[in-house]
Image: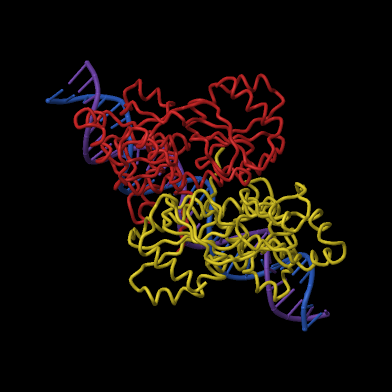
Chain colours: A red, B yellow, C blue, D purple
Amino acid sequence: MQFRHYNQLKVFTIVAKIGSISAAAEELNLTKGAVSHQIKQLETTLGFKLFERLPRGVALSQKGLAMLNSTEEGYSIIESRIQRLQNDDSRALTVGVSTYFASRWLSPRLTSFLDQHPDIRLRLQPMIELTNLANNGIDVAIRWGSGHWHDVESILLFACPAWPSGNSKMSAVVVDKGLEHALKEATLLHDSEHSAAWREWFSAAGVTWHDPEKTLIIPDPNVRVQAVIDGQGIALNDSLVEGELESGKLHRLSKTALDSYGYHIVWASGTTPSTDVLSLSNWLQNIA
Amino acid sequence: MQFRHYNQLKVFTIVAKIGSISAAAEELNLTKGAVSHQIKQLETTLGFKLFERLPRGVALSQKGLAMLNSTEEGYSIIESRIQRLQNDDSRALTVGVSTYFASRWLSPRLTSFLDQHPDIRLRLQPMIELTNLANNGIDVAIRWGSGHWHDVESILLFACPAWPSGNSKMSAVVVDKGLEHALKEATLLHDSEHSAAWREWFSAAGVTWHDPEKTLIIPDPNVRVQAVIDGQGIALNDSLVEGELESGKLHRLSKTALDSYGYHIVWASGTTPSTDVLSLSNWLQNIA
DNA sequence: TGACACCGTTTAGCATAATTAAACGCTGAG
DNA sequence: CTCAGCGTTTAATTATGCTAAACGGTGTCA
């Protein structure tokens, strides 16, 4: 018995990312009834609920979140390939970025690059897992981390420390019972298995590392931030969440930060960057 | 304008893997007319041909092959997650393998393990890119390569050297004009960007490495073998292709092999393997 | 407190897309 | 030359997706 409902699953992915059926319906040029139907039918065929129904809307269930992690990744791999094959534009410079980084940092600054280099055709490629660059036709990617990678060569773009963050309720727990208690009780949100970030943070903070019982892997930074706001747990978020900090949706839970972490320009090791890549790197480093 | 035809794309993936519309139709419990329709419509919306029509069937076009690489990966990520969420069987031991390895090596030997350990629930998880183990719920994976990986810990299961292979036409070229000439003229088929395999083979063979003009990345070993048989180029295939060698579909083009390559049992670094994992590893090492 | 706005759900009917059966065209095998 | 195999086409049928409109629940605000 094969699964045959990939269109419905794609609709789910959009609803889950947007967080609302009505808003997703608008995005898709559909009525909310249609979207509601798709989700319901999908839940029936899958055999489990993807969303919890709240008075004021819907929220991802535990399984729904796990599903989103995979569908986002899967569909983005497929979509990026379609795009690439359709505009078979081998002269374009393709930059792999997370949507998180693109919307919060890169996009606002990009016009100046396009002005300075009108000859370079730039394609931003949203990706979740910034791996397998060549196979996805990525010339350069921008990746957050410590900079110690083996599959790519990298240069630091700018430092962007990360620290534990939670919502206001979590913040109250920290004030009340202390950070260590909160870290022990709450779910720790990871960005991926590879990331040693949490372990490094624990050692930087001088807190003994205890293998956490409750762990949730959420690769997409946007989804992770939203999960923290929704009270799912504590995540190491980087400094690009200023907006949420100021608006009080997110709280910094500790002064200890992973100072050596930041955004890096990376390209597949073994390849020599083209002049276009160098232009972009230079420009990025200047404005950073 | 969004792409909205993921079901058709899934049908394409199956047709491409099987290599025939009629056979795929049977697999899907559909008529060949239906499948033909789907493919044609998909090609129209995409704007390019996925298959070349031959008198005796269909063959993937260049773009079709590129598409297959992505759809296979994308759908397998999604499907594996669905399976996992449906049989939320946290006690099962999940082993990530390529379908290539599973069918050619593991499956035939597996009954003896199941007999010896009736208490262990085993789940074989077909994967293309054997990365991101924890995120995909993989306890252990079996990966081919040199064994020098940073994201996983590994122990060698058995050595499985690889050497350049081509079809009979390619073999004739080698006999006629020499291997170096063939390597320079033909497309080199890679398994992924990370793989330094070809470079290492060149140095092992004492042939000077020239950055090849024509390169094709085909992550799935099954598809890669088929591509070689179809005359797409030369690939480094491992010794599990005995069958194709004997039947004359595949030819070994050089005596030089990557002797240090083989299949390894791998698990996410930083995690401690469970006793079930150790049982499986022990059994695997004994029968290897 | 009560009218209202906001969401998601439901219903029934309609529009679109998927699927079939059967005939067709092509090519290579015998 | 005939036949078998494979993909394509056509027209009719079936399944699915979608809409409009009404509905039920909940929080908001006068």
Count of picture labels: 0
Q: Name which quarter of the figure residue A238 lies in.
A: top left
Pick the front one: A163 or A250: A163
Q: Name which quarter of the figure residue B219 lies in.
A: bottom right
Pick the front one: B222 or B42: B222
| x and y percentages locating residue C26 in the rendered image | 78, 65
Q: Is residue D17 left or right of residue A95?
A: left
Q: Is residue B122 left or right of residue A279?
A: left
Work out whether B43 lies above or below A164: below
Quadrant where the C terminus of chain A is found in the figure: top right
| x and y percentages locating residue A5 in the rendered image | 46, 54
Residue at (42%, 64%) from the top-left corner?
B123
Pick the front one: A203 or A174: A203
Work out whether A279 lies above or below B158: above
| x and y percentages locating residue A231 in the rendered image | 29, 36
| x and y percentages locating residue B214 in the rendered image | 75, 49
Q: Name which quarter of the figure residue A267 lies in.
A: top right
Residue at (53%, 45%) from the top-left corner?
B4
Work out whether A192 lies above or below A101: below
Quadrant where the N terminus of chain A is found in the figure: bottom left
Work out whether B148 lies above or below A81: below
